[in-house]
Image (tube, coloured by chain):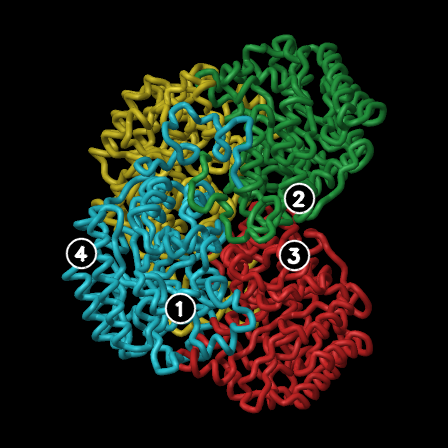
Chain colours: A cyan, B yellow, C green, D red
Amino acid sequence: MYGKIALEEAWAIRENFKAYDIATLAPKGVIGGDLVANLLDIHGTRLHQMDENGVDMMVLSLSSPGPQGPANRQEAEDLARLANDRLAAEVSRAPARFAALASVSMHDPGQAAEELRRCMKDLTGFVGVIINDYQSAGEDKNTMLFFDRPEYDAFWEVAEELDCPVYLHPREATPLIFDQMWKDRPWLAFSALGYAHRIGMHVLGIVTAGVLDRFPKLKIVIGHMGEHIPYDLYRIDHKLNRARFPDMPMAKDKLVRDYFGSQLFITTSGHFSTPALLCAMQEIGAEAIMFSIDYPFESIPNGCVWFDNHVPIGNRDLVDIGRNNALRVFKRLTKWPHMLEERGPRECGVGGLGLRKGAEGEVEHGLYNRSWDAREKHN
Amino acid sequence: MYGKIALEEAWAIRENFKAYDIATLAPKGVIGGDLVANLLDIHGTRLHQMDENGVDMMVLSLSSPGPQGPANRQEAEDLARLANDRLAAEVSRAPARFAALASVSMHDPGQAAEELRRCMKDLTGFVGVIINDYQSAGEDKNTMLFFDRPEYDAFWEVAEELDCPVYLHPREATPLIFDQMWKDRPWLAFSALGYAHRIGMHVLGIVTAGVLDRFPKLKIVIGHMGEHIPYDLYRIDHKLNRARFPDMPMAKDKLVRDYFGSQLFITTSGHFSTPALLCAMQEIGAEAIMFSIDYPFESIPNGCVWFDNHVPIGNRDLVDIGRNNALRVFKRLTKWPHMLEERGPRECGVGGLGLRKGAEGEVEHGLYNRSWDAREKHN
Amino acid sequence: MYGKIALEEAWAIRENFKAYDIATLAPKGVIGGDLVANLLDIHGTRLHQMDENGVDMMVLSLSSPGPQGPANRQEAEDLARLANDRLAAEVSRAPARFAALASVSMHDPGQAAEELRRCMKDLTGFVGVIINDYQSAGEDKNTMLFFDRPEYDAFWEVAEELDCPVYLHPREATPLIFDQMWKDRPWLAFSALGYAHRIGMHVLGIVTAGVLDRFPKLKIVIGHMGEHIPYDLYRIDHKLNRARFPDMPMAKDKLVRDYFGSQLFITTSGHFSTPALLCAMQEIGAEAIMFSIDYPFESIPNGCVWFDNHVPIGNRDLVDIGRNNALRVFKRLTKWPHMLEERGPRECGVGGLGLRKGAEGEVEHGLYNRSWDAREKHN
Amino acid sequence: MYGKIALEEAWAIRENFKAYDIATLAPKGVIGGDLVANLLDIHGTRLHQMDENGVDMMVLSLSSPGPQGPANRQEAEDLARLANDRLAAEVSRAPARFAALASVSMHDPGQAAEELRRCMKDLTGFVGVIINDYQSAGEDKNTMLFFDRPEYDAFWEVAEELDCPVYLHPREATPLIFDQMWKDRPWLAFSALGYAHRIGMHVLGIVTAGVLDRFPKLKIVIGHMGEHIPYDLYRIDHKLNRARFPDMPMAKDKLVRDYFGSQLFITTSGHFSTPALLCAMQEIGAEAIMFSIDYPFESIPNGCVWFDNHVPIGNRDLVDIGRNNALRVFKRLTKWPHMLEERGPRECGVGGLGLRKGAEGEVEHGLYNRSWDAREKHN
C-alpha cells in the first residue's frame, strides 16, 4: 500500500542518551543494524526505506523514556524543550514526509501544558504529544507520577483545547519494581511483556478515572496493538463491576469499550500479528486502529510487507488503518505544512489481487509468489 | 440494536399470486406462520414485530419473481405498475417505517426506465428498484433475458441518472433448466442453492460486462450475504484471467473485488451466519454490507437476535451494517418523507457489554444470560 | 511447511486430449508456462517444484473431464483403463512422491465399480478415485448422468467397501446448458464460477439423496475450498426445510453440516484465500480441510507460499491441513508402497515465527521480510 | 453442548476464609448471588446448575490464594492438607460429577512434592494441582517466591513424574506492589487487570526459564483465555531476542508458541469473548484450549450459554474444547473413580443448526430465537 502513515517512530538526540545509560541500548547487530545510528538518522536511511516501502509520512518522537526518565524536574523540562526545538528543525526540512510529537516533562502538569502550547502554537510540525508512561520522580527514582491523578486535569484540559492527541508510550520499570518482579527474568521486563503491563495499567487508570469523560474531545493513542487491552476487553469491562467498585469515577453508563474509535485508538507498532489485528478489529473496530512500525526497534520492511501483503482485510479498512484514520485523529497532518489528504484504495495501489504496479492484465499471476514456477527467495 | 433498517423485505398483492402458482408458496405452518397472510400484511403483525425487534424501517418490495415472472410483456408491465401504485399508497401510511423498491418489467429496457422514472419522480416512497434475476420471455417461458446485454444500458443509464440503487434478487429456474438440473433434487432448486447460482451468475455477468464501468455512479445490491461471491472472490478474480479472456469487457485494470463498497453491496438477508459475515467483512469490508432479514421467508426475531446479540464485531461496524450504510446507499431514505438520519452506537443502544436498556451499573451481569443463576429458556 | 501432501493435481495423457478439443486448453503462456507440457510431465519440472516447495507427495489424477467426457460408453471405459494403467506405471517409478486417483467411466455403475476394484486390488499406487462431475451421455452429449440416482448405489457400495475416498471434481457444462446460460459470458463458464455451480449442486444432491447415510463409511472430497458450500452452510441447512421437502431422503436428524469431517472433506485447491479458509475452519473445522494446489492450472509456489507463510492458523491445524488429514482420509498413503507417516509441527519445520531452516537464535529477524533493512523483491 | 467439563471452579472451606480477610470477598449480591454460600456449596445449587447447563464434570479447587496466601510456612502447609482431605471427601460423594485439584504450599519445593504425591497416590479424586501464582513469604508478606527459580525443579520433577497437570491461577499483589501501583485504582488491581499481569509474568517466567524443556512431559494450564498471552504471542516471541538475551535458559530453537498444545494449555474461565477465542484458536490452536467457567465468580448459565450458543466454531472443535481436550490433559478423569470418556459432536447434542433436543424435522426454525414470531425475553 502506498501512502502509509506511521505514528510511533522513534528518533533520538545524543543529549537524550545521557538521560539513560546508553549501555542499555542494544549493541550493533542485536536489533537490526546499528540502533544508535538509526535513532539519530532521519533524512538518510530512514527516508530511503520509507520510499522503498510506501511510507509517505513518519510522525517522529523522542525515544523512550524521554523527559519521563529524569527524576529531576529541571533536567526533564530542559530535555523536552531541547528535543522539541531540534525536532521542529528536522521536520521543517521535509514536512511532507515527517511530523512531530511533542515531548513534555510531566513533573508539573501546568508546565507540561505550557510546553505543549509552545509546540503546538509557536513551533511548526507538531501534530500531537507523546508521554512515556509514568514520570519518574523522587531522589531514588522510585516515585511514579501517574496521570490519572486529579492534578493532571490541568494537562488534559490543554491537550483537549489544542485538539492534540496524546500518544501513551511504554517505558521500563522503576528500580524498586524491577527488583521485586523482573530482575530474575530480565528478558520479560521490557518490550516482551513489562512494557505492556505498565502502560496498559496506566491507560486503563486514566480511562477509569474519568479523564475521557471530563474531556470528551480528548484523544488517546496507544501502540503495540493496544497493549493487550482489545483481547481482554470483555473481561475488563465485565470485571469493572460498578456494584463492587462504586467509587470508580468513569461514567456509570459507559464501558471501556465505548471509548474506542472516538477517544481511544491503537496502533500496530511492533506487533505484526494477523490474528491479533483481526481480534482487535472485531472488538474495537477498524476505525480505532492505525498503522505504525516502531522503527528503529522494528524493521520497516518487515512491518510494511506484513501490512501490504499479509493482512487479509477489506480494501477500505486497509487504507483507513494504513493512512486515513491517522488524518482523522491527528488532524494537523492535513494542514500546513504537511497537507496530507485522505486517499481511496486505488490511489494507494490497493486492489487487484494485491499490491502491485501495472496490474493490467496480470490477474492470472500469483498473489503470493510473483513467479509462476520458481519459489522466490523469501523467508 | 435499535434503529435497524432492513432492505430485502417482501410484500405481495393478490394479483401477483396469479403470476405464479400459489401452490408453490409454502402452506401454512411450513415457513413460520402463515406465509400468504404475512406477505399481504404490512401495518399489523409486521410492524408489531419490527417494534419488538428494533427495526426502524423496512424497505418493501413485491415478492419474487414479480414482473420478471410473466413471459408476456403486457402482463409484466401491468403487474409492475399495479404493484408500484399499491406500494406507494401503503408506504404513504407510515413513511417513517416503510419505504419501497420499485418493480419493473424488463422486457423492454426503455419501458423499464420509464416506469422507474415514474416511481422515482411522480410517486413518493421509492428509494430504489428491485429486479428478480432474469426476465422470462418466449412462449415456452424458457427464454431468459439477461441485463448484461448491451441493449440494457438504456436501463442502467436511467438508474444511474436517478441515483437509484438496483437490488438484484433471485428467482426460480426456467422449466427447461429445472428439468435438466433440478427436478430430481427439488429441495436444492430454490433458496438452498439454485437461487444463489442463478443470481450470482447474473450479477457477475453484469459486472464483467462492464456495466459498472460505463455507469460509475450506479449501485447494485445483492442479498443472502452476497450469493456466495465474497467467499470465492479470490478465485473469481484470479480466474477472470485477462490473457485467457481478452474480450471480457470489464475494465482491464480492475477486479470484481474493487467494486465492492462503492458500486456493489451485499445484505445479510436470509443468511444469519457469523462465520460468513466475518469472511465477508474481511473480503469486501463492512462498508459493503447492510443488514436485511428477508421477511416473511425468514423470522424477524431470529434475524434480529442474531444481529443484535450474536455478531462479534465492533460497535461502529454494527451500526453501520445495521443502519448507516443503508442511508449512504439508498440516499432517499434520508429525504422526505422518510427523513432518517445516521446514528452512533450509543443512540442505537449498542455499547456496554451488549444491547440492553438501562445498563447503568449492570456491568457484572451476563452478556449471554441475563439471569445469574437460572438458564433462560432459549434455544 | 515441509512434508505437504497435495491431492487434486492433474496429469494427462495425449490420448485424453482427443476426448476434448485441445484448443480449449489455454495456449502457452496464458496459464503459467506451457500447460500441455506441464500436464504431461511428472518426474521433471513438477518434481523439481515439489522439492523446492516442501511438497512430499502429489496424488495425481487424469485431467478433467477424463472418462466423464465421452458420451460414448466404450470410449469412456477405454480411456479410464488406459489412464489407470499408465498412471500406475508412472507412480511406481516414485511411489514415495506420487500416488494415484483412479479414473472410471460412470456410464454403468457396475462397470465403474469393477474398474475401481481392479485399480485398488490389482494395480499399485491407487489411494482413491476421481469423478469429474456428471457423466456425459446421449448422442447430443446433453444427457447428464448424476450419481445421486438410486442406481449408483452399486458404485458407492464398492467405494465404501474398498475404503476408497471419492474426489468429486468439476467440469464444463453440456452444450445445451452452455448455450442457455454461459455463452454470452464465457469467462464465467469455467473455473471462475460455473465449475463450482455444477459440482456444488451435484455433491449436495448426493448428500441430500442419503448416499452418505446408506454408506456411512464412504468419504467424499471436494476441492476449491468446498465449492462455495462452507460459506453458505447455515443457509443451506436452514433452507433444506424438512416440513417443506418431506421427501428429501437424507437422514431426518442430520444436517449437511454434520457430515463434514467424517464423510465430507474439502481441499484448498485453486483457492488460496485466507478469509475463505478461516470461514471454512469455523464452519466445518480443520479436520475437514486438506491442502491441495490444482497444478498445473495453479502455480505450485504461489499455492505453497500462501500456505507456508500467509495462513494465520495454529501450528497443529497447519500440519493437519497440510499433511496429516490426508493420511487419515486417504489411508492407503500410509501403506506400501507410499509408507507416509503423520508428522508434528516441528518435523515439518513449522514453529518459531515462521517456516525456516536453522531458526536457532533468529527470533529477532522478521517473519515477513527476512532482511532487516531492504525490502525483498516479492510481489 | 451436553457433557462439558469445567476446570477452574472454586470451592472454599471456612478455614480458608481465615487465611485472608473475608471482607475482601464481595458481599451478597455484588457478584451474582451469595458468593460465600456458593463457594461453600458443592452438591446443592452448584450441581443443580451443572445439570441445567450441560456440565458433566467440575474439577474443583480451593479458592485463591489458598496455601499461597499464608506467609507462614506451617500455616500454609496445614491449610493445604486440610483442604485436600476435605475435598477428597466431597469428591468421593459424586466422583462422576466432581474431581479435584490438589492444593500445595510452595514454601518448600520438596514438601510441596510430597503433599502432591500424597494427594495423587493416597487420596482419590485428584486429577491435577493448582497453584495460585507466587508463594507469599517473609514477615511483611512482601516476599514473592517464584517457581521459575532452579530450586523448584524438585517440584516440577514430581509433577511430571505423576503426570499431574499444574494449573497456574492468579492472585492479588503483595502489599508493597499494591501500594506502588494499584492503590489509587483498586478496580484494576484484581480480576480486571492485575491478576493477568502477575500470573502472565509468572508463567512466562517458568517457560523462559526452561522448566518445560527440562520436564518435557510436564503440562501447565492457565485460565482466563490465556492471561493475555495468545494475543501477544507474536510480539512476545519476537522480543525474546536471543541475541539480546543470550542467558535466557529456554531451548534456543523453540519459541513460546511451540509449547502450546503439548505442554501449555489455556481455559476460557471468566473470559467469554468470541473474538478472543477466535484469536486464540488462530494463534495456539483448538487443541490448546479447554472450557472453564470460574464459578462462583462467574455465572454458570452465562458461560454455558455463550459456549453452547454463541461460539461460531466447528462441531469437532466445540466438543474438543468443551470436553475432550480436558480428558487428554487431565488423564485421570478417564480413570476410576471418574471414568469419563471422549465423545463426538452427536453424543454431545452438537449438530443441527444448534444445540437442541429432538431436532428431527426442526431445521426451519431459528437458531437464535426459537419462536418464529415473538422475540424471546433474553438479554
Task: Measure the C-alpha gap from mark 3 to mark 4.
Answer: 53 Å
Type of amino acid under label 2? Cys
Q: Residue at x 30, y 60 (%)?
A: A13
Mark 3 falls within which chain? D
Q: Nearer the viewer, residue D208 or B358?
A: D208
Categorize mark 2 by other alpha carbons within 10 Å: few (<14), some (14-19), many (20+).
Answer: some
The subunit letter for the residue under badge 4 reads: A
Residue type indicated by callout 3: Gly
Q: Which residue is mark 1?
A: A21
Badge 4 and badge 1 in a common chain: yes
Q: Position of residue C294 (x, y in %)?
A: 60, 28
Residue at numbered disc 2: C348
Do the residues indicated by labels 3 and 1 lie within the same chain of the protein?
no
Q: Is residue B275 visible?
A: yes
The answer to the question of whether label 3 and label 2 lie on touching residues, with beta carbons closer than 8 A, is no
Give x and y (percent) for residue A265: 35, 59
Residue type at mark 4: give it: Thr
Q: Nearer the viewer, residue C318 or D155?
A: D155
Is B322 rendered above or below residue B205? Answer: below
Would you call the spot at circle 4 few (<14 residues within 10 Å), some (14-19), or many (20 or more)? many
Label 2: element kind: helix
Task: Identify the image quadrant of the N terminus of chain C.
Answer: top right
- Which label's residue is closer to the chain start, 4 or 1? 1
Residue at image mark 3: D261
Residue at mark 2 to residue at mark 4: CA–CA distance: 54 Å
Q: Which mark is residue A124?
A: 4
Chain where mark 1 sits: A
